[in-house]
Amino acid sequence: MHIGEVEVIKVVEWQGEIAPAQTIIPGSPPELWTGNAGWLAPDHWNPETGGYRGAVQTWVLRSEGRVILVDTGVGNDRDRPQIPLFDHLATPFLERLAAAGVRPEDVDVVVNTHIHYDHVGWNTELRNGDWVPTFPRATYLIPRADQAYFDPGNAHRRPAPRTPHEQLRREGSLLVYADSVAPVLGRAELWEDRHRLDRNLTLEAAPGHTPGSSVLRVSSGADRAVFVGDLLHSPAQIVAPEYSSCFCEDPQQAATTRRAILERAADTGELVVPAHFGGPGAAEVRRDGSRFAVRRWAGDPSAGY
């Protein structure tokens, strides 16, 4: 699709059912899912199992002659004990990227909206036993707040894990930092608050999911879009933005940020592009009383994308 002069291509690494929907979006009532089954299924929810369905994908943007990747998925060959589904994943992601016309050496910028395992994985690849940058010419844009938060040297500043699951996530984040973040810091630009890539693209802080969670805004001609990372895991959160995902470091702040992002998108006509939506992967939203609803999906012939 095109957002003004910016070309956008979705490259899927993995898609399928991950876990019960109410595990992914804790506290969400059953009727949120059953009452919206007509449009949540089959891309976002499995009514037979109650399972959340999603995708791990990278968005390729071509803007002002440069190739920009927004998030880099899980990656191959990694120890991921915190989520066995993706432990030592093996996919032809680079071949799919090539099919979209992008070789690793073509990439100018890699945007990590935040530092979680499924957004930084293909930052690196395993070569001769070492993790090295996958995209040798690229500048990696990483939120400074996340780099500081997940840096193992600052682990003593983080709250102590309260449950075995939190402990497993903490240990997993050390692995993620070691194999997918530390090897690219020599090519990284750490930014905070706001960072302009070019006249079409701007990164903005959007904390809550992680301390450095960010969104990428696209403004080109009359068209607008916002790549929101993990502020939305499921379209159910458009209907009920008060429910945060189980992966949010600060669920309350994430909910506040999510509502603000949706309000602006509804009021200005921004296309909302989350990291993990299956199906078309992006939607226009509208206000629905104090909540929101999907106006139309990207790919709708009437949408003009």
Image: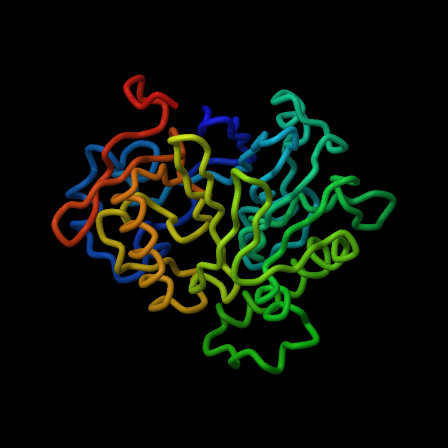
Work out whether 49 lies above or below 280.
Answer: below
**Which corner quadrant holds the N terminus?**
top left
Q: Which of 285 and 179 is in front in this view?
A: 285
In which quarter of the view is residue 244 placed? Answer: bottom left
The residue drawn where x is 57% and y is 69% is 170
The spot of residue 252 in percent (x, y) is: 33, 68
Give the x, y percent position of residue 294. Answer: 24, 37
Q: How many labels does the image show?
A: 0
Question: Percent position (x, y) of residue 161?
Answer: 51, 77
Q: Which residue lies furthest to the top in this view?
A: 301
Left or right: residue 99 versus residue 247 is: right
Q: Residue at x 44, y 29 (%)?
A: 3
Of residues 122 and 135, which is closer to you in this image? 135
Q: How is the image coloured?
A: rainbow
Residue at 79% x, 40% y: name it. Answer: 136
Q: Relative to residue 125, is residue 190 depicted above or below?
A: below
Compared across the picture, whether 223 is left or right of 69 comes to left
Between residues 203 and 114, which one lies in front from this camera angle? 203
Q: Residue furthest left?
A: 289
**Image quadrant for the C terminus?**
top left
Q: Please give left or right for residue 160 compared with residue 77 in the image.
A: left
219 shown above or below 184: above
**Residue 145 horizontal/vertical position (percent):** 57, 67
- The quarter of the picture where residue 135 lies is top right
Closer to us: 158 or 193:
193
